[in-house]
Image: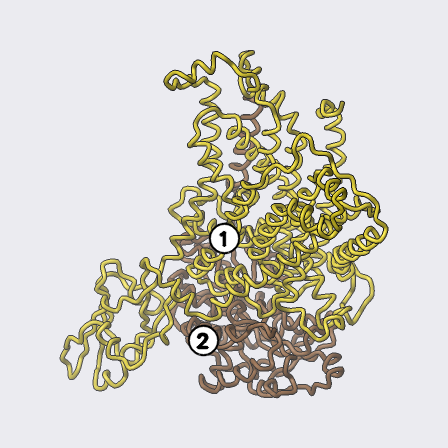
Amino acid sequence: MKKLILPLLGLLAAGAVLTAVNAQAETQLTVYTAFEADQLQDYAERFNAAHPDIKIQWVRDSTGIITAKLLAEKDNPQADVIWGLAATSLLLMKGEGMLEPYAPKGLEKLDEKFRGDSNPPSWVGLDAWVASVCFNTVEAERLKLPQPTSWQDLTKPVYKGHVAMPNPNSSGTGFLDVSSWLQMFGEEKGWAFMDQLHENIAFYTHSGSKPCKDAARGEIPIGISFAYRAAQSKAEGAPLEIIIPSEGVGWDMEAAAIVKGTFNMDAAKTLMDWAISEDAMKMYNQNYAVVGITALSKPVKFFPEGISKAMIKNDFEWAAQNRKRILDEWQKRYDSKSEPKS
Amino acid sequence: MVAVNPIRNAVLATPVIKPKLGRDDWIMRLFMAVIGLYLLISLALPLYAVLSKSFTVFQFSFGDISVQLQRDGHWQDAGTLEEWVGRLSQPVNNDLAPTSLTRLPILQTLTRRELQGVSQVRLRDTSETGGRLLYDAEFSKPGEIFTLEPRELRKLFVRPVATTGLNNYLVYFQTPALRQSIGNSLYIAVITTLITVALAFAYAYAITRSCMPFSGAFRTIAMVPILVPSLLPAISLVYLFGNQGLLKGLLLGEPIYGPLGIVIASVFFCFPHAMLIILVALSAADARLYEAAEVLRTPKSRVFWTVTVPGASYGVISAAFVVFSLTITDFGVPKVIGGQFNVLALDIYKQVVGQQNFEMGAVVSVILLLPAILAFAVDRFMQRRQVALLSARAVPLIPKPNRALDRALLIYCSVVALFILGLLAMSQLASLIQFWPYDLSFSLRHYDFGRMDGGGWDSYFNSIRLGLYTAVIGTLIVFLGAYMVEKCKGFSHGRAGFQFLAMMPMAIPGMVLGLAYVFFFNSPHNPLNFLYGTMAILVICTITHLYTVSHLTSLTALKQLDPEFEAVGASLKQPFYRTLSRVTTPICLPAIFDIFIYLFVNAMTTVSAVVFLYSPDTTLASVAMLNMDDAGDIAPAAAMGMMIFYTNVSARLAYLGISQLLFRSTQAWRKR
């Protein structure tokens, strides 16, 4: 019997050790984020250069998954701070009363667009994440496709079956596109535009970066995606042209907020203060052309010019409050139509 | 017991006397109860959580909100919001059913016309629990009153309340996009089943019933798909037949994204399962039947349809149901190559991850359970009716050479083997190319997983840890459970209950199990909540997901043992665990090793069971593949798939080596 019980006990003990939290002198902050995987280490190091006593434990996933995770944990939150998640997602959390309002130091330096409208704000914006169109020049030449310059261009019959875009039901970028069209063109014309665009769409993807990466691989000539991903693919050597449609482009912010009920409030506030500091803004600027303190925004390599001017006036509250309705309507119109052509 | 015992017969004739339970029996029952409890907690209760979640509906209770209007400085009652809603010309919320996240702007219910001349509006949450209204991101408290000017009403929302009802199911069947998936899933599963079983039958026939050369090699190659996640064939198909595909021309313009791609990739990953089952069925043949047929000058084709096929029919049916449930519950393939073709398993993922609509995810889960349980039940029923084909006097069939047939089968098997190896080679090649298709130089950069989503190399090592934990702990639990069920005396109700629990995981799709764990373990009221987000919950989920096959393997091995061993042990006054550790376990070692390697390999490749459960510290290689493909990094996804493949191959080779060494010392008695 001993022979059996001992290993069993050993396993149980091992499990207990695994789950026990190590006591540590420094403060540990659990930070939920959707920052790109390759940025995390750099961001934490920069923060620790200023505040070595606070250790960041990253919890990273794509926007949709992190949002789902936060909402699923709403009764029993695991995160202390959310740093680097779409503002529209944070608004959902605000709607659930999950965020602790806090005005970080230096809030007044932020561009107005980057501050929530309540005071103290429940969240602050860090940088802008802008929609763009990836256009594969090699495939376009082969297929004799002219370069589009506007959203309306994309509805022309010549592009039939040559456009990919993210499904707004699973992708934050996709929702950003749809909500920006509805805001730019108005509800009725916006849906009419999407009806036409739908005729040209080859496939809707689950994630926002996939259309651009697919365009980079030539899997599809035109991918509706976002500027950061486009610039990255271009830097890798993909034959891409990054297009900013002339009507204007939708955008979202990467934003930060404190999760209500955190036991590390002081450390959380320190991180929030730092997250909108000039130091941090310069850091975001390495990847994103438009950052919260607009004066600091410097152009980023391969980012299309004039992108900050093309950004529409985005009503995030409207987008968050109408999110469910828009998504249901979208699904009704386009998901049920997407039957196999057999 | 073999010998008839006259004393025992005498005892049986008298009124039933219950045997006295010894210490051993109590310990064994205790063990069984503990493992039974484990299955109850890790399987039955989470499933119940899914079921109850699917019946949680959200409704606006407008009757709980009272309205007062101020005109010219006078307050007047204006009834409840329900009355206002009743007067509206169009349905609220565009007639969509609310979910937990729906927030209805109050201005949709208070029409502008009726607010003319109103200087202030007073809204009161009259419910006892509160939370019916939401103002500037704060829930209303019970009895709270909001006094607002009409222009401030923009910030006020009505919030739905959770109740129990069938509404989610109604919404499901009223939404074409969702309803369609049932047909789509069945369509894919039926087509895949027909193709896979036909291919597997011919392949297994070639291996068992012909003198085709290299049959051993073909047998090994057919097992390859078991060693890779189902995502891998789908990724290879994108490279082969996608818009930049090498062999795109072969499809004659038909897109690979959609049912075509799903079926091809599903056939790939289901093939070994079907092939193995049919192989076993075809191996058991009585040569005398064939001799009789030959003597009667029965034509070959008639022999095939009247002897071979009926003999293997149960195997074929069993294989068909296994393929059917594998296909209908798989989510990796349609995720990668499904295009706009929705299937049930994918809908669960989309509802939960994309829309955070957990209730609808639960509804789809329940719907997905039905065909899977049906397939399982039919399979069980068929197996029970399976009669022994081989009597003691049967003569094993030795195939005779037939040049034409052998050559045809050799060509056929080569084509299938080429298909399997070709898909694998495509992924290997794609993962080594710098920038497909524009820069075809060789590069290892796609193996630098730290640059991509998914958790980097950590996720690969996490997967190995998961595989080892699952294999070690799972083998222990499963084997002990099977032992107790098989050797325990009496206690028939308990044993039947345990047996039922042990068979259940087979019918539960991994995706459903994973979602069930989210509902069950993430509830703050659950004392086991601390497991959420740990490696432990992944191990528990994977063991439970893979329980049935391991349990059946153990039972088969244990049933081969003569119960005399225990009887002798007991008569020598040895406790049962000594017999277990000194006799039973060493004899069953081959089966135990089989279980170990089965658990390891499957823990490495499973996606569906763990996709909702991993945490940032416990990202897994198979999930990383999914996330990398999701982000469009399909070459790194292929690279990760190949890493999983090589790991599983090494594990298998190590298993072969170790088992040869070990079995020499423990299994010598099997040889004469």
Q: Which chain's residue wears label 2?
A: A
**In the rendered view, would you say B301 is above or below A323?**
above
Q: Which mark is residue B592?
A: none
Q: Residue at x 64, y 71 (%)?
A: A229
Q: Name the foreground residue: A178 vs B44.
A: B44
Answer with the quarter of the image where residue B241 lies.
bottom right
Query: Does residue B567 sit above or below B170 in this rendering?
Result: above
Identify which amino acid the numbered label 2 is placed on. Glu
**Chain letter of the residue carrying label 1:** B
Q: Quadrant of the N terminus of chain B?
A: top right
Q: Position of residue B343 (x, y in %)?
A: 54, 63
Tint of chain B = yellow
Closer to the observer: label 2 or label 1? 1
Query: Picture quarter containing residue B91?
Result: bottom left
The numbered mark at residue A329 is 2
Q: Residue furthest right?
A: B403
Q: Which chain is brown?
A: A
Task: Report crowding for label 1: few under 14, some 14 to 19, many 20 or more residues within 10 A (C-alpha).
Answer: many
Answer whether labels 2 and 1 touch (C-beta < 8 Å).
Answer: no
Determine if residue B598 is in view: yes
Q: Secondary structure at mark 1?
A: helix
Where's residue B511, x and y in %?
Answer: 53, 54
Relative side of B163 to B664, left or right = left
Q: Is residue B246 left or right of residue B321?
A: right
Q: Amino acid at mark 1?
A: Val
In the picture, measured across the screen, residue A175 lies left or right of residue B205, that is left
Outermost residue toward the front in this view? B296
In the figure, residue B577 lies in which quadrant? top right
Q: Report the residue marked by disc 1.
A: B512
